[in-house]
């Protein structure tokens, strides 16, 4: 950024001050903005996109995330955005027949008291609805901003570009919710620790009116792990995990993606091969990342900006809503000093550590496409009903990272599970 060409006077920003500036109006940012604005806090949200588009992000919220969604008062907003519940999951596998898999579905409504199951909603639709809701609660949103620069401190300022002009706004606090590649995190010099997985995860949205809207599907066959999440009105979000070494790019990427749903262990999925394509096909390398101190003076990071969970276990929406709720609770308690966010950082660090254990186990169990991997997967799944620590670590993505005992997440327990064969 060169010079401050124009300060104030923007159509959407009435003044040069706000209590809170939120950078990034996605899931975490808009949820936090709505909760604060609804309690009378003066909030400005700066969002890069004019219109949210499908970037192949998370659309399936876990039962423990539903609790956070409800605590933030967002269930009706996301239902109206096209969201819906799914009460059971069928776990297909090349080691059993389709009939065996279908006879023993996972009851998603039994994971968290009072929650009917997982909740699926389109990511662009959810972001748009949450940002609109934040505005209805009183937040001022500025869409389509360009470069942004945050100066932390006791009275932080945010400089941003809009329509070729630079603008500056000062605040009591900045919430950075600008996603995985967070510009604000980089500007603050907050580094992330990261572990890479050996899987890549790809996704694509299709429409298939014949696909049942009350069952989600997970499974492994050959060299793919597949996930199928229905949404209302025939929409189906498909994900595939493959080995990082497998070639997934090229012009035929989308066709090859769909072709992988010709599955012997899940014959019903063959209708998806011919389904109407409704969005881009993109793959991302799996990884977990985290920071022990996702804040600086005058700035706190939430959602992916503060570090993300490997998408293989689909935690990002739940994590983003928990972050938003935690930070909002602290602020509504009238604690805005830098030290006030330490309890959030401590809780988040342990939450993400536990989720890292679960994502590692999920990758090892579901995405090891070798004979040894198959044998281990069989042994792990056979033990789920008899060994509470195996169950706790494997089910934590659904029940929530704090629902299982701490011993489920120790190196000893992980070593024991991975040694099964
Ligand atoms: C392939 C894949 C599959 C996934 N599957 C699941 C799943 O099934 N379930 C699940 O819970 N999670 C899943 N996730 C993770 C989930 O999508 C994210 O964790 C979640 O969207 C994070 O929310 P967020 O608000 O932190 O970030 P985002 O949703 O990325 O929002 C960030 C916002 O900030 C804006 N922004 C970025 N930079 C700037 C800037 N400089 N200035 C202003 N605005 C900016 C962006 O435009 C965006 O609107 C998946 C992720 C991937 C990649």
Image (cartoon, helix red, strand yellow):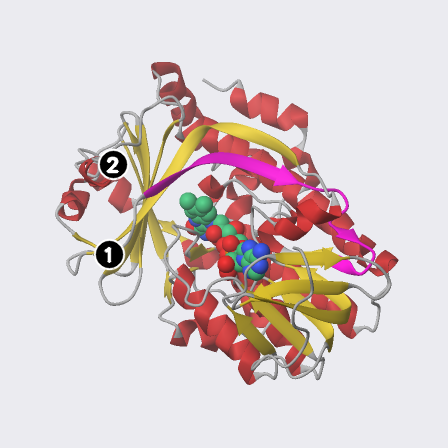
Query: Could you tell me which secondary element the residue under label 2 belongs to?
Result: helix
Residue interval drawn in magenta: 282-299
Crowding around mark 2 (Cα neighbors within 10 Å: few <14, some 14 to 19, many 20+) is: some
Image location of residue 391, percent across then percent down? 53, 38
Q: Which residue is mark 2?
A: 253
Residue 81 sits above or below residue 220 on the image: below
Crowding around mark 1 (Cα neighbors within 10 Å: few <14, some 14 to 19, many 20+) is: some
Tell me if 215 is positioned left or right of 316 in this view.
Answer: left
Residue 328 sits above or below residue 364 on the image: below
Query: Could you tell me which secondary element the residue under label 1 belongs to?
Result: loop
Image location of residue 7, percent across then percent down? 68, 74
Image location of residue 218, percent across then percent down? 34, 42
Residue 376 sits above or below residue 145 on the image: above
Question: Would you say the residues marked 2 and 1 are in contact, meaning their CB atoms lie under 8 Å apart?
Answer: no
* Magenta residues, dominant SS class: strand
Q: Earlier in the sequence, mark 2 or mark 1?
A: 2
Tell me if 232 is positioned left or right of 299 in this view.
Answer: left
Q: Quadrant of residue 214?
A: bottom left
Label at residue 391: none
- The question of residue 5 being in magenta is answered with no
Residue closer to the observer: 193 or 25? 25
Ligand 1 lies under 8 Å from the Cβ of mark 1:
no
Q: Is residue 383 visible?
A: no
Which residue reaches farthest top?
Answer: 372
Image location of residue 50, percent across then percent down? 44, 67
Residue at image point 40% right, 28% down: 367
Q: Quadrant of residue 326?
A: bottom right
Residue at image point 57% right, 80% down: 12
Q: Which residue is mark 1?
A: 278
Quarter of the figure that contains the N terminus: bottom right
Between the residue at mark 2 and the residue at mark 1, the CA separation in whole angstroms equals: 15 Å
Residue at image point 68% right, 48% down: 185
């Amino acid at each position: 950024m060169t010079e401050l060409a124009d300060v104030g006077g923007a159509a959407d920003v009435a003044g040069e001050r706000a209590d809170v500036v939120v950078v990034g109006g996605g899931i975490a940012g808009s949820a936090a903005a709505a909760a604060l604005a609804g309690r009378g806090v003066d909030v400005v949200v700066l969002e890069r996109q004019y219109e949210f588009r499908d970037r192949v992000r998370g659309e399936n919220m876990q039962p423990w995330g539903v609790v956070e969604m409800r605590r933030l008062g967002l269930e009706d907003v996301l239902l109206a955005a096209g969201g819906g519940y799914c009460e059971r999951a069928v776990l297909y596998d090349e080691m059993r027949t389709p009939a065996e898999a279908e006879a023993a579905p996972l009851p998603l409504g039994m994971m968290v008291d009072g929650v009917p199951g997982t909740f699926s909603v389109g990511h662009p639709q959810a972001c748009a609805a949450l940002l609109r809701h934040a505005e209805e609660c009183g937040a001022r949103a500025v869409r389509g901003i360009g470069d942004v620069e945050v100066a932390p401190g006791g009275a932080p300022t945010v400089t941003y570009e809009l329509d070729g002009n630079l603008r500056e706004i000062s605040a009591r606090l900045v919430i950075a919710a600008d996603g995985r590649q967070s510009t604000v995190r980089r500007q603050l010099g907050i580094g992330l620790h990261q572990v890479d997985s050996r899987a890549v995860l790809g996704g694509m949205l299709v429409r298939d009116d014949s696909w049942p809207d009350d069952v989600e599907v997970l499974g492994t066959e050959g060299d793919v792990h597949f996930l199928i999440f229905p949404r209302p009105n025939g929409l189906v979000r498909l994900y595939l995990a493959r080995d990082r070494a497998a070639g997934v790019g090229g012009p035929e990427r989308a066709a090859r993606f769909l072709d992988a749903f010709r599955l012997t262990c899940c014959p019903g999925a063959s209708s998806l091969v011919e389904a109407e394509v409704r969005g881009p096909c993109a793959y991302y390398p799996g990884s977990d990342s985290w920071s022990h101190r996702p804040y600086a003076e005058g700035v706190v990071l939430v959602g992916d900006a503060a570090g993300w969970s490997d998408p293989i276990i689909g935690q990002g929406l739940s994590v983003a809503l928990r972050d938003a709720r935690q930070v909002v609770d602290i602020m509504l308690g009238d604690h805005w000093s830098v030290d006030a966010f330490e309890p959030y950082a401590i809780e988040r660090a342990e939450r993400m550590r536990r989720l890292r254990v679960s994502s590692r186990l999920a990758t090892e169990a579901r995405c090891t496409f070798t004979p040894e991997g198959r044998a281990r997967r069989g042994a792990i799944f056979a033990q789920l009903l008899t060994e509470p620590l195996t169950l706790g670590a494997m089910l934590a993505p659904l029940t929530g990272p704090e629902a299982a005992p701490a011993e489920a997440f120790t190196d000893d327990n992980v070593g024991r599970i991975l040694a099964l064969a």
